[in-house]
Image (cartoon, helix red, strand yellow):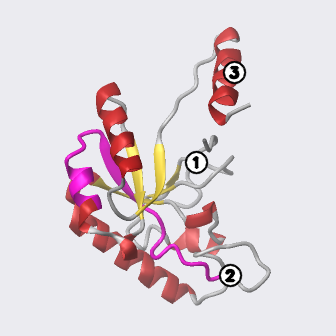
């Protein structure tokens, strides 16, 4: 069964129970304009549905900026800094784990935030989407100081606001 079929079946069950799901749409790993991104942005525009584009600041190309600026339903989130694995060998991939000094991690977060803010202006929302959906609790605690007011990973969350000044809104379906 495809991801779309599983989602449709789950939403049907919700409807049968009188429940309504709230959804938001996020695309990850964006660096440049691609045919797939153009399709996504066209669907969002035609359906008038907002879409969040999680962009990798260190790999940002002008073509992505141009594509997003021309797409009225798109906003940009920060997808890490360079989408580079810093985990020790044998550990699960993580850009913002416990394997680097916190000051170096925070400096990258600020540099990434600044680059996206400068490129996208008000279309940039200060929300971090960590690559591989992994982030150390010590890094989460530093996000507001780095100028980030939102966090999105995958799966359930412990709290809507894991630390003061930070809201968390996760994804639960990966199609």
* Magenta stretch encompasses residue 74: yes
Q: Could you tell me how far apart the alpha carbons at marks 3 and 1 are, in whole angstroms?
A: 21 Å
- Residue 98 placed where, x, y %? 67, 81
The residue to which callout 2 is attached is 87
Do callouts 3 and 2 mark residues in contact (Cβ within 8 Å)?
A: no
**Mark 3: few/some/many CA within 10 Å (<14, 14-19, 20+):** few
Residue at figure coordinates x 21%, y 57% from the top left? 66
Q: Which mark is residue 170?
A: 1
Give the left or right position of residue 5, taking residue 66 as reference: right
First in sequence: mark 3 vs mark 1: 3
The span picked out in magenta is: 64-87
Helix, strand or loop at label 1? It is loop
The residue to which callout 3 is attached is 9
Helix, strand or loop at label 3? It is helix
Quadrant hosting residue 121: bottom left
Residue 6 vertical placement versus 12 (above, below) = below
Q: Could you tell me how far apart the alpha carbons at marks 3 and 2 are, in whole angstroms?
A: 37 Å
* Magenta stretch encompasses residue 70: yes
Mark 2 or 1, closer to the camera: 2
First in sequence: mark 3 vs mark 2: 3
- Residue 116 placed where, x, y %? 30, 66
Mark 3 or 1, closer to the camera: 3
Residue 126 vertical placement versus 98 (above, below) = above
**Mark 1: few/some/many CA within 10 Å (<14, 14-19, 20+):** some
Q: Decide which of 107, 56 is in the foreground and name it.
A: 56
Residue 57 vertical placement versus 121 (above, below) = below
Q: Decide which of 115, 105 is in the foreground and name it.
A: 115
Do callouts 3 and 1 mark residues in contact (Cβ within 8 Å)?
A: no
Q: Decide which of 32, 16 is in the foreground and name it.
A: 32
Residue at figure coordinates x 69%, y 21% from the top left? 9
């Amino acid at each position: 069964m495809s991801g779309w079929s599983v989602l449709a079946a789950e939403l049907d069950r919700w409807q049968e129970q009188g429940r309504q799901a709230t959804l938001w749409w996020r695309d990850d790993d964006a660096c440049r304009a691609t045919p797939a991104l153009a399709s996504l942005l066209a669907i969002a525009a035609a359906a008038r549905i907002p879409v969040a584009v999680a962009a990798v600041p260190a790999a940002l190309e002008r073509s992505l900026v141009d594509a997003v600026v021309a797409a009225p339903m798109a906003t940009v989130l920060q997808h890490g800094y360079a989408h580079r694995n810093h985990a020790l060998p044998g550990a699960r991939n993580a850009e913002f784990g416990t394997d680097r000094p916190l000051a170096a991690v925070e400096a990258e977060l600020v540099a990434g935030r600044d680059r996206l803010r400068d490129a996208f202006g008000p279309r940039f929302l200060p929300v971090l989407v960590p690559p591989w959906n992994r982030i150390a609790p010590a890094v989460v605690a530093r996000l507001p100081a780095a100028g980030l007011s939102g966090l999105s990973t995958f799966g359930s969350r412990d709290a809507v606001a894991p630390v003061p000044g930070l809201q968390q809104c996760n994804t639960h379906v990966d199609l």
